[in-house]
Amino acid sequence: MASHFRSYIWDPVLIVSQIVLMQCIYYSFLGLWMAGVDSLVQINRSLDQIFSYQNLGFATIQGRLSMMAFVLNSLTCALGLWFFIRRGKQCLDFTVTVHFFHMIGCWIYNAHFPAALSWWLVNIACMALMAVIGEYLCMRTELRAIPVNTGPKSNL
């Protein structure tokens, strides 16, 4: 039987806990980015900024700032993928899962499926950004040289 380098072991508890962790990272940092962006222009904070797709748009300053917070959040979540998922191969899976649950949350919050083009553009761009940067960081870590000889060198 051949041994596999980094053989994958099915661990549903680990996977579910990583999904929950990534959702917590997504919403906590999105809330922090929204609060920071809102403090720039003195906008009242609301859950509408996170879940209501009517707030995302190019026409108003609030919509553009909300989009900026979503983009900054995707960078933060890419760091979360790097720190907690640590597998480049799983970055896209966790990114799509996080954004899928966000879409479900928006659907429930608004009582209908998101239909605004700006919402879809922002979320697809953020998904791509989070997956690509997270995968880059994870692959960079995975491809580091493994030290073979860590003991002292001796002259023979």
Image (cartoon, grey):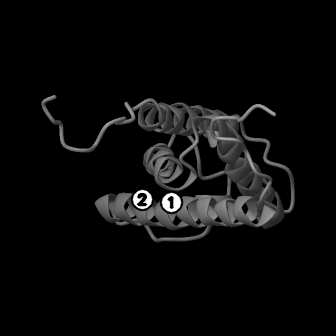
- Residue 69 drawn at (x, y percent): 45, 51
Question: Which amino acid type is marked by label 2?
Answer: Trp
Callout 1 secondary element: helix
- Numbered circle sitting on residue 33: 2
Residue type at numbered disc 1 = Leu
Whether residues under marks 2 and 1 lie with C-beta atoms below 8 angstroms apart, the answer is yes
Quadrant assignment, res 125: top right
Q: Report whether 140 appears left or right of 154.
A: right
Q: Which is nearer the eye, 13 or 123?
A: 13
Instruction: Provide the secondary structure element on which disc 2 rests.
Output: helix
Identify the image quadrant of the C terminus.
top left
Mark 1, residue position: 30
Crowdedness near tag 1: few (<14), some (14–19) or many (≥20) residues, C-alpha within 10 Å: many
Give x and y (percent) for residue 100.
Answer: 76, 49
Give the image location of residue 110, x and y in percent.
79, 61
For the residue carrying disc 2, how many other residues have a C-alpha within 10 Å: few (<14), some (14-19), or many (20+)? many
Query: How far apart are the two marked residues, 2 and 1, measured between alpha carbons?
Result: 5 Å
Q: Nearer the viewer, residue 137 or 116?
A: 137
Q: Left or right: where does residue 153 sit relative to residue 116?
A: left
